[in-house]
Image: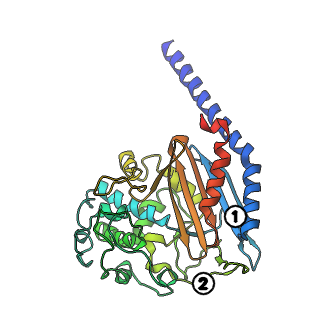
Amino acid sequence: MKTLRRALLSFALLAVVAAAAFAQQIEIEKRVPLIEKMIAEEMRKASIPGVAVAIAKDGRIVYAKGFGYADLENKIPFTPQTVSRIGSISKTFTALAVMQLVEQGKINLDAEVQTYAPTFPRKQSPITIRQLLCHQTGIRHYKGDEFLSAKRYNDVESALAIFKDDPLLHEPGEKFTYTTYGYNLLSRVVETASGERFNDYLQKHIFAPIGLKQTFFDEQSRLVANRARYYTKRKDQPVENAPQVDQSNKWGGGGLLSTVEDLIRYGAAYDGSQLARPATIAQMFTAQKLRDGKPTAYGLGWAIADDQGKRRVEHSGGSVGATSILTKYPEKGLIIAALVNCDHYGAPQIKNLIAKILFENPAQNQ
């Protein structure tokens, strides 16, 4: 009898949880007309070619839609399955690869980078893996026309030549200085620690295990179904094709392609133990401190913020001809992803407006 009562109680509890989740989904659906109206207005005001957004609640996609065109010339619609550049969201994949290897004892977060990348020249002060992950090394970001580079690099090691001999901008640990090149160096660390090519490592240990079938390295020569075209717009000028670039100078820092659906799947996988242990994920989602104890707004591969009491973990991306955003509200069980195939408008703005609409709903704030 006790066993029956216990089973009935468990069933009732599951029913309550399911009903609450369903109610929250319904509330999100009620906000869809506002979201779609907002996106249409933003696209009209800013001459945005195409947008895709997806929203997940408790790991399940409850809304995904594309707007406008992935290819303006051929009038190909932008859909949730459109593959587009994700820019610096790529850094989260590199950081995750590093942390997986930390779990395996193959990387020590506080070891000097030369332990794993011996060809990288020593600087005026030691640089650690942790400092690379949280942008505290003083390694520079792009300069000149490097962001628009069309040069092909055949491997991660050769692309380090772009910046490896340059002096640091400041002492490691002294300041937060955002750098894509620091993450390029981390991708080399992943290679030497794992014994695998960086591309192969991500495919085998991150993409495949969670079913990311539309996430790729942005290689010009590769045939990628549903790949977007990219656009830009100068002030008071019409939209035009973005310049052709080669992303091999920034694989680990900004060289991936994905869809909003794959990004949601990836973001949701952080809530379990499929990618890394919960304690490891918690460490990645914790804002790091400078040498003087002052906190930054960046963890290990993820930006950390607080929206009026709602913790936000996210990464945005800006590429030639595209912008992107992947945001998690961990305590709300909410994930938002957005992709835009132009670089004159930021996908984070779309996300911020979506979040504003969603959080105006009282049910979402309970």
> Which residue lies at the image location 41% right of the left edge and 70% below the top edge?
179
In the picture, measured across the screen, residue 193 lies left or right of residue 216, that is left
Q: Is residue 24 left or right of residue 58?
A: right
Mark 1 or 2, nearer chain start: 1
Label 2 sits on a secondary structure element that is loop
> Residue 49 in the image: x percent, y percent?
71, 71
The residue type indicated by label 1 comes to: Thr
Measured from the top left, where is residue 109 in percent x and y?
28, 59
Q: Residue at label 1?
A: 79
Q: Quadrant of the C terminus?
A: top right
Q: Residues within 10 Å of mark 1 (few under 14, many from 20)?
A: many
Q: Amino acid at mark 2?
A: Pro
To which quarter of the image does residue 333 belong?
A: top right
At mark 1, the secondary structure is loop
Establish if 293 lies above or below 95.
above
Front residue of 347/168: it is 168
- The CA span between labels 1 and 2 is 23 Å
**Badge nearest the viewer, 1 or 2:** 2
Q: Residues within 10 Å of mark 2 (few under 14, many from 20)?
A: few
Given residues 332 and 265, the one toward you in this image is 332
User: Is residue 270 positioned above or below 48 on the image?
Assistant: above
Residue 268 versus residue 6 in the image, above or below? below
Colour convention of the picture: rainbow
Q: Which numbered tag is attached to residue 40?
A: none
Residue 210 position in % (x across, y down) = 49, 56
Residue extending furthest toward the bottom? 151
Foreground residue among 174 and 140: 174
Q: Which mark is residue 243?
A: 2
> Residue at the location (66% across, 45% down)?
358
